[in-house]
Amino acid sequence: MFASRTGWALAPNRFSAALERHGAAGREALDLTESNPTCCGFAYDPGLLSTLADRRGLAYDPHPKGLRAAREAVCGYYQQHGAKVDPEQVILTASTSEGYSFIFRLLCEPGDGVLVPAPSYPLFEFLASIQDVKLVSYPLIYDHGWQIDLHSLSEALTTRTRAILVVHPNNPTSSFVKPAEMEIVHSICQERELALVADEVFLDYAHDGLARPSFARPRQALTFTLSGISKICALPQMKLAWIVTSGAPELAREAMARLEVIADTYLSLSTPVQLALPEFLARREGIQRQVKERVAANLAELDRQLAEKESVRRLDIEGGWYAVLRVPATRPDEELAIDLLEQHSVIVHPGHFYDFPREGHLVVSLITLADVFAEGIRRVMGNF
Ligand SMILES: Cc1ncc(COP(=O)(O)O)c(C=O)c1O
């Protein structure tokens, strides 16, 4: 009765099953994977909600690309990043996940391939399979920081490849795409007539405070830059994201015309949230400051505890909300994570969730409440 693309193994994996058992037994746990900013004790500006009460929100006058004023606010965001974007290049979506689905629909016949980095964000597998897209991973290698393995990326290209996806900075490796890598990936896409898809949801969270260039710049390769307010404004519940299309003008125009039809079919955004977007973006500094302070404090605590522990290290971090711990690879990461939960009541993610190529990696969220983070890390360290 069901399409084969939905034939997922729905039984919980061993780690999720352990989490369920732990919860069912009424046992508390320190959750070092909390990455929902609305659960992390940040003080949101109470005025944010009143922006949703704009009376214009009572009228329904949809535009497939999204309300013009909201798209202009997105252009303002890129202007602050030194990129000139026109509202005609912007399509609003309910989430970056929805943005991915539109782009995959636009570019791929069933079975076509999209190259994605590994390690990276685990949701890509589902986003692709629901659209009948085949994900092919290209490795990021950790050698004096994270680098794209450009040789392997080139080797992974086939006649069925439609796009190369980059995450800037990546989750969970936290690495930005370096300017030289940007150039090469652009050239490959242009030469092979592939699209470049750049996920920049964490772009504003560089640990050194230095702004990195956005992919939303006029270049020849057809480029889709994705972002949204779930990370930029720490408002995932508001459900607003966007795609910026750039590239050779004729190609970009054609892509936008087709994307507009896809967006028009769903019209998935609510009017009040679009009306509120200019205010959400204008007020993002306040929440970003809190997130950055939390990340910096947790990172300092992590480093303080690591200084006393020979056998555990963290990998270099450039941006975003995650840290990767390098622990002794004496057994599978999943087994280790289950042990940490059952023996020490602390939740961390095993590296293989993110497609790390070998054992010995644990991933923690740096926006976790500071006292939970400090005690949780103490428990993790106590295990080695
Ligand atoms: C790299 C990356 N892209 C996209 C998202 C999700 O964004 P959205 O809430 O807009 O779908 C996440 C969420 O963690 C992410 O890590």
Image: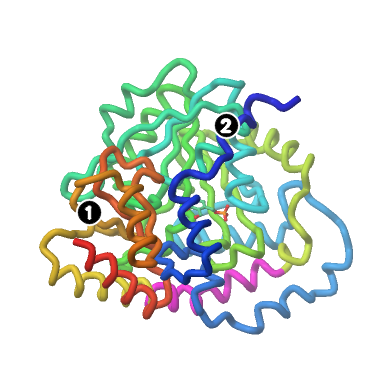
Number of other residues with Cα within 10 Å of mark 1, as a class: few under 14, some 14 to 19, many 20 or more: some
Number of other residues with Cα within 10 Å of mark 2, as a class: few under 14, some 14 to 19, many 20 or more: some
Q: Position of residue 243 (x, y in %)?
A: 59, 47
Which secondary structure lies at badge 1?
A: strand
Principal secondary structure, stretch drawn in magenta: helix
Q: Is residue 206 visible?
A: yes
Looking at the image, the residue that sits furthest to the right is 59
Residue in the foreground of this view, choosing between 127 and 105: 127
Q: In the rendered structure, which segment of residues is drawn in magenta?
A: 276-293
Residue at horizontal 26%, vertical 27%? 151
Q: Amino acid at mark 1?
A: Arg
* Nearest to N terminus: mark 1 or mark 2: 2
Q: Mark on residue 326?
A: 1
Q: How many marks?
A: 2
Is residue 148 depicted above or below 111 in this figure?
Answer: below
Q: Quadrant of residue 50?
A: bottom right
Can you identify the residue that label 2 sits on?
129
Is residue 200 depicted above or below 366 in this figure?
Answer: above
User: Horizontally, is 246 left or right of 71 in the view?
Assistant: left
User: Horizontally, is 365 left or right of 123 in the view?
Assistant: left
Residue at horizontal 44%, vertical 33%? 164
Residue at horizontal 55%, vertical 52%? 85
Q: Position of residue 220 (x, y in %)?
A: 46, 34
